[in-house]
Amino acid sequence: MEKTDILSLSLSELEQLLVKYDEKKFRAKQIFQWLHKKRIMDFDKMTDISVQLRQQLKENFCINGLFMQKRLESSIDNTVKYLYRLSDGNFVETVLMDYSYGKSICVSTQVGCKMGCNFCASAIAGYVRSLTPSEILTQIYETERDTGVRVTGVVLMGIGEPLDNFDNVLKFLNLISDKNGNNLSLRHVSLSTCGIVPRIYELADMKLQLTLSVSLHSPYDDKRSEIMPVNRTYNIDELMKACRYYIEKTGRRITFEYAVIDSVNSAEKDADKLASLLRGMNCHVNLIPVNRVRERNYRTSRSGAADFAKRLGQRGINATVRRTLGSDIEAACGQLRRDAGSKGGLDN
Ligand code: SAH
């Protein structure tokens, strides 16, 4: 019988399973705390659990870990980029960023991505599978173990589309914020989506306190469909309706991500259209100088993002340019994994 991945179980799921083994419910909380609070990844070291129960745990559960395949540290700004190998040999990327207010971590939610955004290295490298809750979670645990720091913010902006792995991402959010475990407020979590509209409605109805980031990248349907195929299924009008619903339901401000690309989406007319789209909305625009991807010719000129921010500002839209971190270890999101795959032939 296949063993159960214990790090993917919520506290209540673990309680239910232990009761099945004729154990008291409170044992689940002890085990959960060993794993998620004390980060003890060995049943034999859980000293307040009986030897008999530890044996049973070993027979029925596994504690899945990640293997650090590669670690690149920036000498400019302390950004650390990890390539982690999963138990089946696939790879994901994780980035630890150093901000004045704390450490923020960018985690992957899938091995590859189906969404096909044409400026994104993750899409070019292809889709393999979704991550389990524990595979998302242990990117954080392993990075904290490696660096000895406590992460204060989490962004779901690595490889993958979080809303295309909805159930596991929700389980992950539950695990990361559990008071008996890691206890991180969802106010310190951002989830970035390319715009899977039905899931935005579902998320809104859950009224979680996380920050929703929506990758917009163009205010025009024809252009957005060209660079983001998801727009052919959920167009800008439908996306904006869902975003307004999200803001109304949760009372939270939305962030729109906008990679500024020369000759694609940063002219005066783009600023006009974007401003008319967002005017009056409780939102913020995050402008991203585009990361160069080998296969594409997209670029942002030196002042491109700042110029576009100014244009938006003149039109009453609040926009900031995302700081570029780890430029000396640059490899646009998804490129480490793709390179590992092509060399080692381990993924896909
Ligand atoms: N699938 C999710 C989250 C992962 S990508 C999403 O689409 O939002 C995180 C952000 O990086 C998204 O806004 C994405 O559009 C952007 N991005 C991807 N490739 C990029 C590149 N080459 N340059 C700049 N931003 C990029």
Image (cartoon, rainbow, N blue to C red):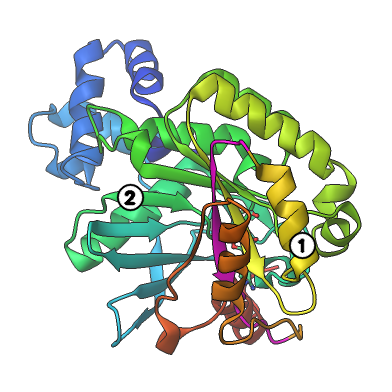
Q: In this view, does 280 lie to the left or right of 158?
A: right
User: Measured from the top left, where is residue 172 in percent x and y?
Assistant: 45, 38
Give the label on residue 340, or none: none
Residues rendered magenta in the picture: 280-294
Check disc 2 and report its element: helix, strand or loop.
strand
Vertically, is 250 above or below 78? above
Residue at 31%, 38% in the rendered image: 58
Closer-to-camera residue (11/184): 184
Would you call the spot at circle 1 few (<14 residues within 10 Å), some (14-19), or many (20 or more)?
some
Residue at 62%, 55% in the rendered image: 160
Give the label on residue 153, or none: 2
Q: Name the residue under label 1.
A: 270
Check disc 1 and report its element: helix, strand or loop.
helix
Q: In this view, does 59 lie to the left or right of 202?
A: left
Is 302 within the magenta? no
Residue at 76%, 86% in the rendered image: 297
**Mark with earlier residue (1, 2):** 2
Is 281 within the magenta? yes
Q: What residue type is labelled 2?
A: Gly
Closer-to-camera residue (293/65): 293
Quadrant of the rendered structure where residue 7 is? top left
Q: Which amino acid does label 1 sit on?
A: Asp
